[in-house]
Image: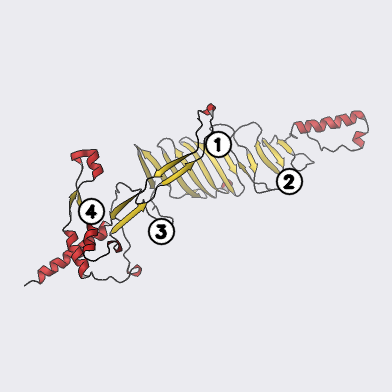
């Protein structure tokens, strides 16, 4: 351990022996990064100091006003710390831990990150002023039940969390007691025409907005619409999905309804534009591709070289669909008209 002020005065250079001693002291301090339990008395911009008290190698900032921690002297967990925020900044972030399976703290001043080992897996925390226990978001992969949990926390009090779990091939997205909400009101869909959920299991049906304040006045069906509604009711029958028949043969289940194409024909035969009605839907999509950069060979890690390639992630197509609730309401009005006509007969 050696420190020096790196300033050889005239008095200290009055003899060769004294001069040599002062130069050796300065060189030893440089070689040892001014190591010591306390900071050097005389400091310079960009000067290194091996702080043996905290165990960090530190560097003086550009303005020579403070020390910036760089990394642990013994190579243990703690990571490589790099300054951010421009010249003179005292903030830093950790590139990563220096040992495997260790706790790592990432400090950016206002924002702190922490990777903490637990008995069930590693927890990553991202937030503000975690040293005082204020706001942070905790993310954890639980090895015991293959769940990834995201939980916001305020001053040590955990709010409802979101879990992504895998049980027997199922991925479960859930919360513990609260609702899952979209990012904005009435602006996002769940799935699309080309990426559909195969089935939805729920404790009750969907709730659709039917507030008079959000609608134009309800208009009665025209004569053409009533005729179409009656004709649509007569089209109801059973069918099987072709994909189910191919996979299950005679065991494919039978469903009740009609085809959208037949409903379109009936609407048009009554002088109606089928796509002006919400119960008839049509979606069309284009081919989609993702470009991947070339991969360089890394034999040490078993990685083979691969040229850049383009992957097709979606094939162009289209699909017709119903909104069953609106279709059935349309048909129900036609049935009501038919019953009313029967009741009106003498």
Residue pointed to by mark 2: 62
Please name the residue shown 73% across and 37% down the image.
Answer: 49
Structural distance between the alpha carbons of marks 1 and 4: 59 Å
Q: Nearer the viewer, mark 3 or mark 4?
A: 4
Earlier in the chain: of badge 2 and badge 3, it is 2
Earlier in the chain: of badge 1 and badge 3, it is 1
Please name the residue shown 77% across and 39% down the image.
Answer: 40
Earlier in the chain: of badge 1 and badge 2, it is 2
Coordinates of residue 177 in the picture (x, y in percent): 38, 50
Q: Is residue 201 above or below residue 1?
A: below
Structural distance between the alpha carbons of marks 3 and 4: 28 Å
- Residue 1 in sight in this render: no
Residue pointed to by mark 3: 187
Q: Is residue 210 above or below residue 71?
A: below
Residue pointed to by mark 1: 103
- Viewport quadrant of the N terminus: top right
């Amino acid at each position: 351990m050696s420190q020096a002020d790196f300033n050889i005065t005239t008095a200290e250079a009055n003899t060769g022996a004294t001069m040599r001693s002062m130069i050796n002291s300065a060189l030893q301090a440089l070689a040892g990064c001014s190591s010591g339990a306390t900071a050097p008395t005389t400091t310079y911009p960009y000067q290194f100091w091996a702080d043996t008290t905290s165990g960090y190698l530190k560097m003086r900032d550009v303005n020579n006003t403070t020390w910036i921690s760089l990394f642990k002297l013994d190579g243990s967990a703690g990571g490589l710390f790099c300054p951010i925020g421009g010249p003179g900044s005292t903030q830093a972030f950790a590139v990563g831990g220096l040992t495997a399976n260790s706790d790592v703290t990432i400090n950016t001043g206002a924002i702190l990150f922490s990777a903490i080992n637990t008995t069930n897996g590693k927890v990553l925390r991202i937030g503000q002023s975690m040293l005082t226990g204020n706001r942070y978001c905790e993310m954890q992969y639980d090895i015991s039940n293959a769940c990834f949990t995201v939980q916001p926390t305020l001053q040590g009090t955990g709010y409802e969390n979101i879990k992504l779990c895998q049980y027997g091939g199922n991925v479960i997205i859930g919360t513990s007691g609260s609702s899952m909400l979209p990012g904005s009101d009435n602006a996002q869909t769940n799935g699309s025409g080309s990426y559909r959920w195969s089935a939805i299991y729920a404790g009750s049906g969907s709730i659709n907005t039917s507030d008079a304040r959000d609608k134009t006045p309800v208009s009665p069906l025209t004569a053409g619409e009533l005729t179409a509604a009656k004709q649509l009711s007569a089209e109801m029958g059973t069918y099987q999905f072709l994909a189910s028949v191919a996979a299950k043969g005679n065991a494919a289940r039978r469903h009740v309804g009609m085809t959208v194409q037949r409903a379109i024909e009936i609407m048009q035969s009554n002088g109606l534009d089928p796509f002006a009605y919400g119960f008839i839907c049509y979606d069309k999509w284009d081919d989609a591709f993702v470009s991947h950069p070339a991969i360089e060979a890394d034999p040490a890690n078993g990685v083979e070289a691969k040229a850049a390639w383009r992957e097709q992630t979606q094939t162009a197509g289209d699909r017709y669909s119903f909104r069953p609730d609106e279709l059935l309401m349309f048909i129900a009005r036609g049935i009501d008209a038919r019953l009313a006509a029967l009741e009106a007969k003498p």
